[in-house]
Image (spheres, helix red, strand yellow):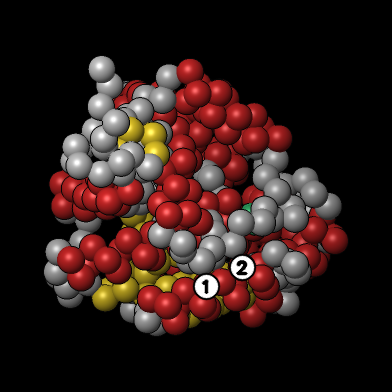
Amino acid sequence: MRSKLCELCDTNRPALVRPKTGQRICKDCFYYVFETEIHNVITENKLFHRGEKVGIGASGGKDSTVLAYVMKLLNERYNYGIELHLISVDEGIRGYRDDSLATVKRNQQQYELPMTVVSYADLYDGWTMDNVVARIGMKNNCTYCGVFRRQALDRAALSLDIHHLVTGHNADDIAETVLMNLLRGDVARLPRSTEITTQSETSPTKRSKPFKYTYEKEIVLYAHYKRLDYFSTECTYSPEAFRGTARAMIKQLESIRPSSILDIIYSGEAMQLSHSVQDKLPQQTQCERCGFISSNRICKACMLLEGLNTGILGLGLGSDRKTRKLQSQTPECAKG
Ligand code: SF4
Ligand code: ZN
């Protein structure tokens, strides 16, 4: 007969069915496995070194709120010796980002971590996302936003002498990106989309995903049981239909076979690029305009900004490989 007790400790009454494994476990055991698996990912991949300053991309959503909470907890529990700093980007989206930033500010006090906010308006000639959408409409808005956010985070990190950022991208997001790259035939991006740490040709800062193998459902459960303070409203200018469809497919697969999420990630990891594909990947150089690292003479952010300022809206929005790459990344906003 099936035990009425937690399948892990065999002592407490179970409080939940673990989405990743289907085990009926108690809250304490859930916290333990959830946190320990993330710690194991961090140590097995040697993500940090003692004394390192690490920025946490914090939006106030569930993923980055849990990330900030767990990073602080593990840093103290296992004495990583790293210095954590919350970095938030204000995209200028009324009714969405202003409220979620208020959540990050509360988290900052709850977790006693330093915090820096940078805004699109300050960095990009006064362009907020509200203004961008008023100019270009609801098509490609996430491309502008993604390019701007990436550079905004880099700029904030550099100004704080931080060269390593962690983001709340979880296993579902990574599986989604693998699937989107496959569906678009963008095989060159496949291996990169599953790397736990990347230092892209457009960024001076490396980025890591400690939640690479963490299921979104478990992040939600963890935030719920720990009563973490997070913001759950979706952006007013939510992501395009193609991403939404890929996301729905992942959820459907997960409901039939929970291991699908990890299996998609493992498949992405196992795919190797042939030399002929690798040779076509762009080389790194410096943007002639803003000085940031770019794979073209003028970086994507400067191209898009020029398009906005001059009214030539197609600028920087071609169907080139780089645009596709940007479109295939899960926006960090959607990650919380
Ligand atoms: Fe920006 Fe995300 Fe909103 Fe798109 S959904 S406009 S990337 S905040
Ligand atoms: Zn238990």
Label 2 amino acid?
Answer: Ser
Label 1 amino acid?
Answer: Val
Q: For the residue labelled by badge 1, is the local secondary structure a helix, a strand or a loop?
A: helix
CB within 8 Å, label 2 to label 1:
yes
In the rendered view of the protein, which quadrant contains the N terminus? top left
Q: For the residue labelled by badge 2, is the local secondary structure a helix, a strand or a loop?
A: helix
Residue beneath the point at 27% across and 21% down: 2
Is residue 318 visible in this depiction of the protein?
A: yes
Residue 22 image position (x, y, % from top left):
35, 28
Say whether residue 47 is left or right of residue 244. left
Residue beneath the point at 47% across and 74% down: 107
Q: Which mark is residue 104?
A: 1
| Closer to us: 42 or 259 | 259
Say whether residue 215 is left or right of residue 247. left
Q: Mark 2 CB in 8 Å range of ligand 1?
A: no
Is residue 197 visible in this depiction of the protein?
A: no
Mark 2: few, some, or many residues within 10 Å (few <14, many ≥20)? many
Q: Is 3 situated above or below 78?
A: above
Question: What residue did someone put label 2 on?
Answer: 100
Residue 44 image position (x, y, % from top left):
15, 46
Residue 187 image position (x, y, % from top left):
45, 27
Q: Quadrant of ligand 1?
A: bottom right
Residue beneath the point at 26% across and 37% down: 6
Q: Is 310 situated above or below 263?
A: below
Q: Is 281 situated above or below 68?
A: above
Q: CA distance from mark 2 to mark 1?
A: 7 Å
Residue 294 image position (x, y, % from top left):
47, 57
